[in-house]
Amino acid sequence: MSIVCESNGEVKSADGAKCAEFSEVIKIDEDKVRRHVEEVVRQSVEETLNGLLDAEADELCGAKRYERSVERLDTRSGHYRRMLQTKAGKVTLKVPRLRSLPFETQIIERYKRRESSVEEALVEMYLAGVSLRRVEDITEALWGTRVSASAVSELNQKIYARIDGWRNRPLEGEYPYVYFDAIWLQRTWGGEVEKVAVLVAIAVGGDGYREIIAVCEGTKEDKESWRNFLRHLKQRGLRGVRLAISDKCLGLVEALGEFFPEARWQRCVVHWYRNVFTAVPKGKVKSVAAMLKAIHAQEDRQAALRKAVDVAAKLEAMKLGKAARIVRDGVAETLGYMSFPMEHWRQIRTNNPLERIMREIRRRTRVVGAFPDGRSALMLVAARLRHIAGTRWGTKRYLDMDRLREQEQEERFAAAETIV
């Protein structure tokens, strides 16, 4: 009689009947098998690492242990034990001691207690948006040891140099469209909680791809902070700016004229709508919104200005005098995009491309709460922006910039003909 062992542990004969006498005999304890395999892997890693340490010690000594050789440079002096946390589990290393030469191993760094890959994973988890408490829980579940908040903070210092290098990299080529915004975060200072502004800029380059070009700490969202921010961009090589898009921050608008006088300024249309809505009763917001959208649905700047006059008159008739004044005073600031190719209008008339990124930053920083200082806040924001830049966001072509070059060439020809 042939016997078949099923995956569920039951034993049957070839014709499918259960074999009761074997069912209780043949059982597989999957947990024990898994633990055994894990222990075998852990022991293998431990033996391999200790073998590599011995090989390094032999190389430094110039001879193997107990080997007599005229080329010997040193002799062994025992070893000391050291724990190392690896992805295969905790292993015990027997680190050789030499009598005269220092033993500097390439296997592990001095005083290191975890693999570098493990440490990098911790930092990447934290900087990618995982809360500190969650990082501690994950490390305990994966590696059997709980990494403290102070340990994660120390590990973060190692990656800060790379983040600073990314923040201060040279900017090459031209960036016709640049978006500006700021986010307010909290920091503790002298036992009190204060606000700190982090200024951010993204741009569309001459190749049509988006790039996060700057992130800096600003004491306030004022003219001096924006001046320092723009100076930082200028020093790193930002050039070719045709249009700057932002909310109406007077400090930024004034500073732009100082550092990039050739650039036009585009006030975010969405922010302007919200500004008008502050003077409109809730029940009339929908109808007013349709009127405002009609302004930016026109085919050119002159038509949009004429439409704005009509909208302001309608608002006056609706007893919304304050809203009418906001429309008259600010509509021209929202039409800068109409001087550029129509194919680009939808992407450059609002600050939405940057607003979406800032919402992600707020989501991440909400987990932290108050930062210990402004640099910690800046580093976390910069790290998250660096992470976003490395995703599909930065590898997908955003605009066809050939159309901008064609328009500029047409304008130059037209100007030359006028002079002639």
Image (cartoon, rainbow, N blue to C red):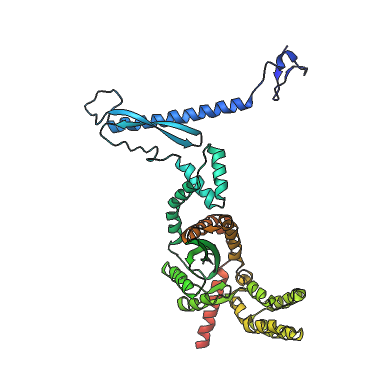
50 over 194 or under it: above or below:
above
- Residue 208 visible within the image: no
127 over 98 or under it: above or below:
below
User: Of 193 and 363, which appears nearest the observer?
Assistant: 193
- Residue 70 visible within the image: yes
Q: Position of residue 180 (x, y in %)?
A: 54, 69
Which residue, as the protein is rendered here, is positioned at the far front? Answer: 191
Left or right of residue 116, residue 267 in this image: right
367 over 273 or under it: above or below:
above
Which residue, as the protein is rendered here, is positioned at the far top? Answer: 1
Left or right of residue 278, residue 68 in this image: left
User: Of 121 and 193, which appears nearest the observer?
Assistant: 193
Q: Position of residue 122 (x, y in %)?
A: 51, 46
72 over 266 or under it: above or below:
above
Q: Position of residue 184 (x, y in %)?
A: 55, 65
Res 105 → quadrant: top left
The N terminus - image quarter: top right
User: Of 409 and 184, which appears nearest the observer?
Assistant: 184
User: Of 333 and 46, which appears nearest the observer?
Assistant: 46
Q: Position of residue 328 (x, y in %)?
A: 65, 84
* Count of number-bearing discs: 0
Left or right of residue 325, residue 226 in this image: left
Residue in the image at 41% along x and 69% along y: 235
Residue in the image at 24% along x and 29% along y: 72
Residue in the image at 52% along x and 85% along y: 417
